[in-house]
């Protein structure tokens, strides 16, 4: 479609179907890009205007990398995009890191422009501790692990993440796995990936959940991979607005691509006529 120019002069690649009574804005995850949602857009666009875009340092926005990019940065970018395109009554959907960006957006800017929010397989707090076991790697990732990771080769860290997100990759020999993983990393700016990875791990949005003023939908993987399915219950216990949880059976963290037909069906079901 084209590029949206941010207030600092950097540009984000975005695609916009332009037509529709309602608007869906979809945010991809870490190391991904807008292409994640491309197979879904034709069906969804029959009912709503669809907007997807590449976060800074990702895909066709790879060169938008002059700032230190955190989830606060991504939230600010979303705010500029919403206002620049004069959007309102939005269904805001975020998968993985995109869901973290949605939570950060609501923390910083509220829900005024939103109709509803769809969070896809993401915890409000990645770091686990004695009191919180619903974080990254199904409750096993701690601050000590993050400090150890700081000194590791970035490809090794990414491979660990990719295998955790898609457990089927465990069966792929290293000589076959390395090339596609390296290719995926080459589509992103490593510096941006590093700062976003740390930002995600140190953020805590648990208090934000209780302040969400629009309906919340949570799409989650069963049996889960990066995150526990028990998060669905936690969100339900802490959100104060209408809540709807949707399990994606036999899915990994990649539920968007694992179960694309169900994903489209569930999203269409919550969009207004």
Image (tube, rainbow, N blue to C red):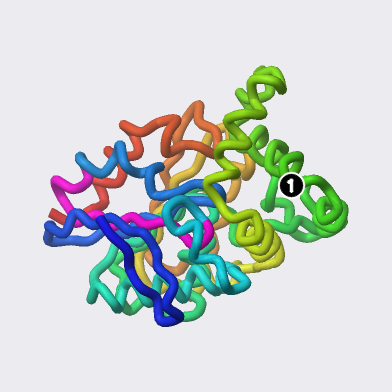
Does 3 lie within the magenta span?
Answer: no
Residue 236 in view of the camera: no
> Where does residue 141 sit, x and y in percent of width and height?
77, 49
Q: In which quarter of the image is the C terminus?
A: bottom left
Please name the residue shown 35% across and 73% down the image. 5
**130 lies left or right of 273:** right
Q: Which of 158 and 103 is in front in this view?
A: 158
Does 54 lie within the magenta span?
Answer: yes
How many numbered callouts?
1
Please name the residue shown 51% across and 51% down the image. 29
Please name the residue shown 78% across and 60% down the image. 131
Magenta part of the chain: 44-57
Above or below 78: residue 225: above
**266 lies left or right of 142:** left
Please name the residue shown 40% across and 68% down the image. 11
Q: Report the residue marked by disc 1.
A: 154
Above or below 58: residue 140: above
> Where does residue 121 sit, x and y in percent of width and height?
52, 47
Above or below 127: residue 230: above
> Where does residue 1 sit, x and y in percent of width and height?
25, 55
Few, some or many C-alpha atoms within 10 Å of disc 1 (few <14, some 14-19, many ≥20)?
Answer: some
> Where does residue 76 sit, x and y in percent of width and height?
46, 76
Residue 264 in view of the camera: yes
Residue 9 appears in which quarter of the rendering?
bottom left
The secondary structure type at the circle numbered 1 is: helix
**176 lies left or right of 30:** right
């Amino acid at each position: 479609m084209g590029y949206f120019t941010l207030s600092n002069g950097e540009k984000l690649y975005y695609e916009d179907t332009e037509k529709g009574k309602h608007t869906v804005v979809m945010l991809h995850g870490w190391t991904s890009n807008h292409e994640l949602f491309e197979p879904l857009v034709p069906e969804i666009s029959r009912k709503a205007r669809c907007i997807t875009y590449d976060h800074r340092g990702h895909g066709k926005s790879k060169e938008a990398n002059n700032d230190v990019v955190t989830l606060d940065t991504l939230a600010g970018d979303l705010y500029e995009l919403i206002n620049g395109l004069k959007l309102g009554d939005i269904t805001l959907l975020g998968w993985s890191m995109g869901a973290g960006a949605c939570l950060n957006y609501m923390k910083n800017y509220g829900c005024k422009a939103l109709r509803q929010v769809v969070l896809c397989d993401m915890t409000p707090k990645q770091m686990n501790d004695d009191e919180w076991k619903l974080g990254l790697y199904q409750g096993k990732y701690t601050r000590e692990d993050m400090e150890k990771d700081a000194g590791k080769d970035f490809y090794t860290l990414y491979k660990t993440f990719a295998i955790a997100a898609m457990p089927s990759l465990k069966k792929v020999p290293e000589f076959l796995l390395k090339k596609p993983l390296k290719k995926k990393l080459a589509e992103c700016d490593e510096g941006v990936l590093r700062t976003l990875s740390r930002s995600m791990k140190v953020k805590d949005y648990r208090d934000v959940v209780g302040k969400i003023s629009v309906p919340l939908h949570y799409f989650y993987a069963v049996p889960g991979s990066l995150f526990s399915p028990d998060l669905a219950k936690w969100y339900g216990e802490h959100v104060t607005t209408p809540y709807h949880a949707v399990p994606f059976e036999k899915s990994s963290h990649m539920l968007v691509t694992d179960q694309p037909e169900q994903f489209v069906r569930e999203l269409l079901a919550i969009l207004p006529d």
